[in-house]
Image: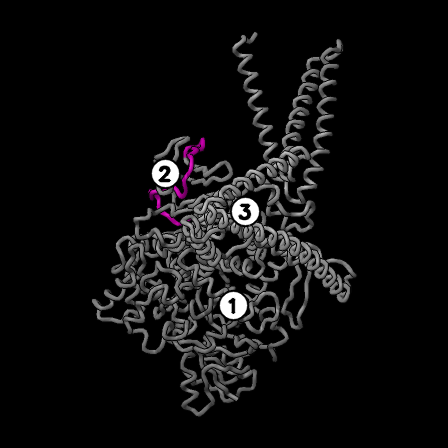
Amino acid sequence: MPNRTTKIKRVTVRAGKNFLATQKAVRVRKDDLGYVSRRNDRLDSKRTFKVDKKGYQEAKKNFHDVLNASSSSSLDIALAKNNLVHAKRRKIVSKKIKKTAVKLDGGTVKSRTAKSLKRSAHMKARSLLETGFKEDETLSDAVKARQAFRKFDYTKYRLNVNARRARKVGSFSGRLAYSLSTRTLNLVNGRGFVRTPDEYSKAKQLANRLRLSKMRLKKSKTGRAFGYTSKFMRFLLSPAMKFFANPLSVFGIVGGLVFLFMISVVMSIFSLTTTYQSEFDLSDSWKLMTLYDRERSDDKVDYWTNLDDVTLFLNEKNEDYSLWDKTYYKVNHDDLLTKTGRYSDYMSVLWDKLNDDTNDIKTMKDVYSNKKNLDNFAFDSDELDEFNEKLENISEEGTYPDLLELDNPLYSQSDVKFDNPLEIVKRYGADTKDSFFNGMTIQANVGQTVLASLDGTVELDRNGTTVRIFKDKDTYLSYVNINGIRVKNGQKIASGDIIGTLSKQNLTIYYRKVRDKEDDKKPAFLVNSTLKKLNTDAGWSYVNPGFYFSKVHYLQTTSVMSDLSGDIATKARQLKPIILKYFPQATDKGIAGALGNWAVESNINPKRAEGDYLSPPIGASASSWDDLTWLSMSGPQIYDGRFPNILHRGLGLGQWTDTSDGAVRHTALLNFANSKNKKWYDLELQIDFMFNGDSPGYQTIAKSILSSSDSPSTLAQRFLINWEGNPGDKLKERQNASEQVYKALTTSSATSGSTDTIPQGYEDKVSPKPTDQVALGNSYPFGQCTWGAYNRLAELGKNKVSSFEGNGGFWWQTAQNRGLPVHRGNPKAHEAISFPPGAVGSDKTYGHVGVVEVVNPDGSILVSETNAGGGLNGKRTWRIISATDVLQCYYIDYS
């Protein structure tokens, strides 16, 4: 049995909990007062008190009845007692709320009468006192001044009263006029004589804007620094009111200065505002756009839309919105179309505008600055100017200056890299069509020191490698794969404190906050299956960590997979022997892994420089390639203020760059070229530099990858991460190119894409069909390409072809000397195609010859040929030559 002390403790604990619950209920109820009117609050609180008082009496009687009944169990008694406790609490709360409501409404009749009597007595005493003071010459002037000030004060009071009354009348008149105007407009538009729904009304939009402004101010750096609360605002405004009451007093002057300072601070905060949504709506919108990327990606294109630009546009254009809010919008689609739907539908149309043409992936700026667009996806001139000015203002503060909560987790403020953008290897959001990655992975090295990004309390996960920092009971940040942990459970830490080191490549973090029910805005029943995937229920929710850091740079970018052009395949074959010259251990798979990356980086063209496709002076002109000033342009110069980590632009096959993290590969390439007395854009020089001039660490990485026998896709990823140092950037495109380069390296170019029969879709286009007959007068060696071309041309009636044209790669020269029509490019059906030695994979000594059978609208051609793959068996094969490769060959008309 518990002793007396234990019983007392239990009773004390219960009483304490009951008291705290009562106080909390009182606070909640008090916050609800004043939303309708003080009179209604007073009447409602009285009625509520009567109901709760009666409920308490009934609960009390029921408890005694149950307690005295012989048939009552201990459970019945406990339930009755619990009901009594709650009924008593409701009565106490109602009584306190009633007293507060009555006091706010002017008090009871008794209290008002007492106040009136007290005021009358005060005025009588004041009158007698002033009458006595008037008889004194010295005090009479002070009395007159006091009475004049009191008269002024009363006049001001009456003016305020009249102003309030006029405001009420004006407000009523305005609401009436607004109601009639909107009803009339809706009637004209065929919607009936009804009011515009609240969610589309200007008043509602203005109220939401004011609410969000207050929320943004509270979340801003300045608001957090000053501990912005209603109490603090009253404290600041109190001296300001003293200024308006008496501007010549000391308090008045000080109050005026404080007030002006606060106004300047607020204006500076709002001028930097880029987001109007709540942080949960922001994350929902981001997740939805990432889901659109994943759902619409396929084996031809891998979408990674630049979502920071999209988020800024959507907030500027639509301000506060939720995915589930209804909206009307116009779309430029031939004729202008008006659509009705939710904002999720609006965003789907926006996604299509950005990505519908894989040959012309658009930026957000392309969409919103297009003056030809008359829809809701473009800014007018004034809006565009304002938005551009805002983007310029936030460049130093970061993309989301009103959401900044997290500091750099890898570098301290004293480090020169502290202000550099975080390189994001894997972004928050959908990573497949059916799954989401709720964190964010930042590029970092194994063993790198990890710092706290915010102040808070530490919690260590049971697995021993995850560290959580609780900012408060509603917010925490998780770090994954940490070892050498330097903090303990329950420890208070500050932003910048060392947490530990990374046990694996790259740092993955998760940021979670508690979403209130009022932030869970989705309808009770969702028909849209895409929106169902987002999981936006109230409670602990993952938010996008990228919103809360000053600057981030996402490395995942859209990749459009295409068939590798014959030109690149030819370059790959030309590079292979050069690579083997400097590194004989290289494998075809290793070479393909490197060249697949270079196909994306530079199109395997040594004469490339970062941004050279732009217009001069940033882009290339004829004299740029040897201009050191042009070559050394930085990221901000090239990209309009972005990418400050690029010190000198990337050059050559691998886009060798000088960066702020200490890499000087751009400078090393130029110095290496000078030491060899060659141009930096010499092809063989750059391969030599890769193995003998680059930093020793990069030389080791290159040799390790190029000598590997792993798959080309695997090696392409390793090359991208470790040699390029740009993980995630167009990875699928690079892997696709690597596989195609490998195929080009391991397959004879002459037979690559060749078929033994006419390709599907061309059967009806080839006319007349070839036979196996040997033409009269054909004295070329059996089975050679020249033998097969002579036979086919004779079948086509080309009687000027002879048996003395020479090797296939020189037929065009012989024909030209004979005066026959010869041209390069622009082929026609039934002409001979002469491949110069080495062109399109032909023999480097003898070249090749075939016959043009079909010319396609895109410039590619179908050719028939023999001995394309060797064997001299006289077998005719068919091959499609790309429009690019067509330009390398000569065409002869033997008619």
Colour option used: one colour
Q: Position of residue 583 (x, y in %)?
A: 29, 58
First to last magenta residue range: 442-464
Magenta region, mostly helix, strand or loop? Answer: loop
Task: Answer with mark 1 or mark 2, whichever residue precedes in sequence.
Answer: 1
Instruction: Please give the residue where the numbered disc 2 appears in the rendered image.
Output: 499
Task: Answer with mark 3 or mark 1, whichever residue precedes in sequence.
Answer: 1
**Relative depth, front residue between 581 and 22:** 22
The image's mark for residue 108 is none
**Relative depth, front residue between 534 and 798:** 534
Instruction: Please give the residue where the numbered disc 3 appears in the rendered image.
Output: 436
Q: Residues within 10 Å of mark 3 (few under 14, many from 20)?
A: some
Taking the spot 43% from the left edge, 77% from the top edge, the residue there is: 888
Q: CA distance from mark 1 to mark 2?
A: 44 Å
Q: Position of residue 139 (x, y in %)?
A: 45, 45
Task: Answer with mark 3 or mark 2, whichever residue precedes in sequence.
Answer: 3
Is residue 545 visible in the rendered structure shown here?
Answer: no
Q: Position of residue 484 (x, y in %)?
A: 34, 35
Is 479 magenta? The answer is no
Q: Residues within 10 Å of mark 2 (few under 14, many from 20)?
A: many
Is residue 707 visible in the rendered structure shown here?
Answer: yes
Instruction: Please give the residue where the numbered disc 1 appears in the rendered image.
Output: 384
Instruction: Give the position of the N terminus as an image quadrant.
Output: top right
